Image: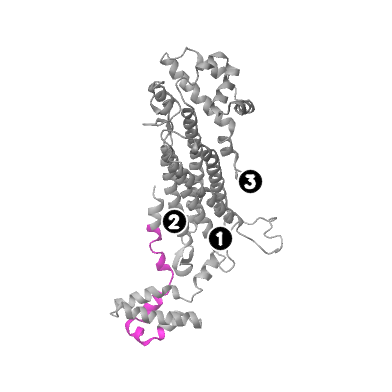
């Protein structure tokens, strides 16, 4: 992933150094198990642990000749640890190391992503409570519908990220498996107890049945969850972008004093961070399809998935980590304009109360069809001639027969739309 959209913590997890370090942990753990089972001489694991050094350049140099990354890795260990290193990898296949290590990297990444989501949840909860009763217009199909509060919008995002947190926890569990089963997964040349030992030591679970690889449906699930989280990020980003439009302008991304919005137009303040998140979300979701296609491999093993995972492993996790942190920063510093929200709420001269007028008419004995037709007629007139709907309603003789002026006045108030906000918040933010 390019540096522009990367944070060091995730980059370090997907570095060559960390990858080979995990490979070494797997090999040493397997050697320790084999020593306990008297399959290899005592002291091999401690000797390798003491003498082995990760030298990425040397590994790459050896790989250039042997054309095999795990063999190159093992050869580099022998150069440092000496002849006893030949006891490493006994009965194992490359996938035992690669797959177990890849899963560890996914787990390491997932745990950081959980922390990222926790930060977003904390900010959303604080902002939602702050704007719990900040009135704004709710929109369906982009058109004014009925009043809501800005806090309610944020509470909706909060609940979605709560679901994302649960999904990610489940996905981390899904990939927390270890396979040390040897060629084609039969344990023909390695004791299954080695796998059990390594799994426990590395805080993983033994893969119930592997072929020569860990089944890739596990990984497809993990990357699918990352794609869903990216969709949630874009949902928030899209809302911000819409609400910052000049015609709406109910909120704005924080714009620093020295910031410039356009090279040509000095007046511009653009939602560039939210637009960036929209683009990054598209990238993350694009990694889901190849992860799904990795499920169907030939027989017990092929390497068509390998090149895919070398790309999507770091890119999807690093990009999502960056995007979550950027979203947290946007939400933390976002500028809200309650007065503009109130102004937009009244933009349609009371049309947002049309449903309540219709419902009251039906309660008074008028059929729903006739009530709908009557209110719709006045709503069209209100919109076209820019007349307050309440004035048209009060002048209508049929409506006046069925509703008092006091009743009409009570309908055209925002507050009653918020009578169940506390009920919703209690459901969302309950402990």
Q: Nearer the viewer, mark 2 or mark 3?
A: 3
Q: Which mark is residue 241?
A: 1
For disc 3, the neighbor class at 10 Å (few under 14, some 14 to 19, many from 20) is few
In primary-sequence order, the first of circles 2 and 1 is 2
In primary-sequence order, the first of circles 3 and 1 is 3
Image coords of residue 90 (percent x, y) = 47, 19
> Which quadrant would residue 274 be assigned to in this image?
bottom right
Query: Which residue corresponds to the image point at 45% horizontal and 52% vertical from the top-left?
Result: 158
Q: Which mark is residue 179?
A: none
**Residues at badges 2 and 3 in contact (C-beta under 8 Å)?**
no
Res 405 seen here: no
Q: Nearer the viewer, mark 2 or mark 1?
A: 1
**Residues at badges 2 and 1 in contact (C-beta under 8 Å)?**
no
The residue range painted magenta reads: 394-423
Q: Which residue is mark 3?
A: 4
For disc 1, the neighbor class at 10 Å (few under 14, some 14 to 19, many from 20) is many
| Residue 69 forms part of the magenta stretch | no
Image coords of residue 416 (percent x, y) = 40, 68
User: Does residue 175 lie above or below 370 as drawn?
Assistant: above
Regarding mark 1 in the picture, which secondary structure is present there? helix
Res 252 seen here: yes
Q: Which residue is mark 2?
A: 156
User: Does residue 395 lie above or below 244 as drawn?
Assistant: below
Name the residue at the bottom extreme. Answer: 397
Regarding mark 2 in the picture, which secondary structure is present there? helix
Colour scheme in use: one colour
Name the residue at the front extreme. Answer: 298
In primary-sequence order, the first of circles 2 and 3 is 3
Query: Which residue corresponds to the image point at 54% horizontal and 18% vertical from the top-left?
Result: 48
- Give how far apart the Cα atoms at labels 2 and 1 are: 17 Å
| Residue 416 forms part of the magenta stretch | yes
């Amino acid at each position: 992933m390019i540096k522009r959209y990367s944070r060091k913590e995730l980059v370090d997890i997907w570095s060559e150094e960390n990858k080979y370090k995990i490979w070494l942990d797997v090999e040493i753990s397997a050697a320790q198990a084999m020593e306990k089972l008297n399959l290899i001489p005592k002291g091999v694991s401690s000797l390798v642990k003491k003498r082995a050094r990760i030298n990425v350049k040397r590994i790459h140099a050896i790989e250039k000749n042997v054309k095999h990354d795990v063999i190159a890795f093992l050869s580099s260990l022998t150069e440092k640890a000496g002849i006893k290193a030949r006891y490493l990898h006994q009965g194992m296949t490359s996938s035992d190391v690669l797959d177990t290590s890849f899963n560890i990297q996914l787990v390491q990444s997932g745990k950081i992503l959980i922390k990222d989501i926790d930060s977003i949840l904390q900010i959303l909860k604080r902002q939602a409570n702050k704007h719990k009763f900040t009135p704004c217009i709710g929109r369906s199909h982009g058109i004014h519908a009925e009043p809501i509060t800005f806090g309610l919008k944020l509470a909706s995002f909060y609940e979605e990220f709560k679901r994302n947190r649960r999904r990610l926890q489940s996905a981390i569990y899904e990939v927390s498996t270890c396979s040390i089963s040897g060629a084609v997964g039969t344990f023909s040349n390695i004791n299954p107890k080695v796998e059990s030992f390594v799994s426990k030591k590395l805080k993983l679970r033994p893969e119930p049945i592997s072929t020569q690889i860990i089944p890739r449906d596990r990984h497809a699930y993990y990357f699918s969850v990352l794609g869903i989280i990216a969709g949630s990020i874009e949902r928030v980003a899209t809302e911000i972008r819409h609400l910052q439009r000049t015609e709406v302008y109910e909120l704005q991304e924080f714009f620093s004093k020295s910031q410039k919005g356009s090279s040509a137009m000095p007046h511009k303040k653009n939602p560039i961070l939210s637009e960036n998140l929209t683009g990054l979300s598209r990238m993350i979701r694009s990694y889901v399809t190849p992860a799904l296609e990795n499920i169907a491999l030939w027989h017990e093993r092929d390497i068509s998935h390998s090149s895919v995972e070398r790309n999507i492993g770091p890119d999807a996790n690093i990009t999502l980590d960056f995007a979550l942190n950027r979203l947290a920063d946007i939400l933390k510093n976002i500028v809200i304009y309650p007065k503009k929200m109130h102004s937009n709420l009244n933009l349609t001269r009371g049309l947002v109360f049309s449903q309540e007028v219709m419902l009251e008419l039906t309660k008074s004995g008028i059929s729903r069809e006739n009530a709908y037709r009557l209110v719709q007629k006045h709503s069209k007139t209100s919109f076209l001639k820019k007349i307050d709907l309440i004035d048209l309603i009060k002048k209508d003789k049929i409506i006046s027969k069925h509703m008092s002026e006091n009743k009409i006045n009570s309908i055209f108030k925002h507050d009653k739309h918020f009578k169940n906000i506390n009920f919703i918040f209690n459901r969302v933010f309950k402990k």
